[in-house]
């Protein structure tokens, strides 16, 4: 190949990201899916595009907002509060409330695009493939609970594999 090494690195990164997207799609695809294509989307149909949940399944109500709520603090002035804090990723409870609001606003979308980055900025001791997978499963459960018959199209983000940006044994 005659590409300069910098351009080759970009091409390889793109190939890895496309491969990761295919892996994620296959993991969420129903095992017994019929081979026929889905029906066409009717004119005027709605859909949801939600992305970058960065779900923190280890959310601590005493988390330190100066540390993205990854560590606890005794200083109540640095706690995230009942509805979280913009420095901190949302808890599962907050994500449940958000999905409930989605369902209240548009209960029957044609489909949902789940735009990636389900996994949050969690304590380093919790960064592993199991935690990444648990975030994916939590988002799937939350969406299925409110949208049981709506197809969900997942897209892989840079926080959706372990180790990050990897194509090997992804979470």
Image (tube, rainbow, N blue to C red):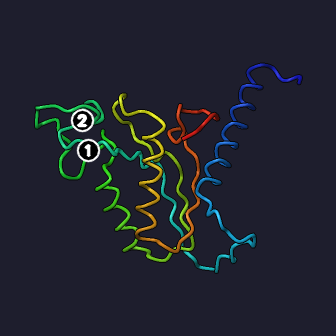
Displayed quadrant of residue 46: bottom right
Displayed quadrant of residue 146: bottom left
Displayed quadrant of residue 20: top right
Quadrant location, the C terminus:
top right
- Note whether 54 is above or below 99 in the view shown: above
Packing grade of label 1 (10 A; few <14, some 14-19, many >=20) is some
- Note whether 117 is above or below 68 in the view shown: below
Along the line of sight, which residue is nearer the eye, 83 or 138? 138
Disc number placed over residue 65 in the picture, else none: 2
User: Left or right: 100 with respect to 83?
Assistant: right
Disc number placed over residue 49 in the picture, else none: none
Along the line of sight, which residue is nearer the eye, 98 or 137? 137
As drawn, which residue projects farthest toward the top? 5
As drawn, which residue projects farthest toward the right? 2
> Residue 122: x, y in percent?
36, 36
Is label 2 in contact with label 1 (beta carbons under 8 Å)?
yes
Q: Residue at x 34, y 46 (%)?
A: 57
Q: How many marks?
A: 2
Residue located beneath label 1 in the image: 85
As drawn, which residue projects farthest toward the front? 32
User: Left or right: 8 with respect to 133?
Assistant: right
> Residue 49: x, y in percent?
52, 60
Q: Residue at x 73, y 21 (%)?
A: 6
SS for dot 1: loop
SS for dot 2: helix
Q: Residue at x 64, y 35 (%)?
A: 167
> Residue 136: x, y in percent?
47, 50
* Separation of residues labelled 2 and 1 (CA atoms): 7 Å
């Amino acid at each position: 190949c005659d590409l300069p090494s910098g351009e080759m690195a970009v091409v390889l990164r793109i190939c890895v990201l496309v491969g990761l997207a295919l892996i994620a799609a296959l993991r969420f695809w129903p095992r017994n899916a019929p081979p026929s294509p889905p029906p066409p989307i009717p004119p005027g149909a709605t859909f949801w595009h939600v992305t970058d949940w960065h779900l923190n399944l280890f959310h601590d109500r005493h988390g330190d907002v100066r540390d993205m709520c990854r560590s606890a603090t005794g200083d109540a002035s640095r706690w995230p509060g009942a509805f979280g804090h913009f420095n901190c990723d949302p808890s599962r409870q907050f994500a449940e409330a958000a999905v409930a609001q989605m369902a209240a606003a548009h209960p029957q979308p044609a489909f949902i695009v789940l735009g990636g980055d389900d996994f949050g900025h969690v304590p380093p001791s919790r960064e592993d493939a199991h935690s990444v997978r648990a975030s994916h499963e939590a988002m799937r459960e939350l969406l299925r609970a409110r949208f049981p018959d709506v197809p969900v199209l997942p897209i892989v983000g840079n926080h959706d594999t372990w180790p990050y940006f990897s194509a090997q044994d992804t979470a």
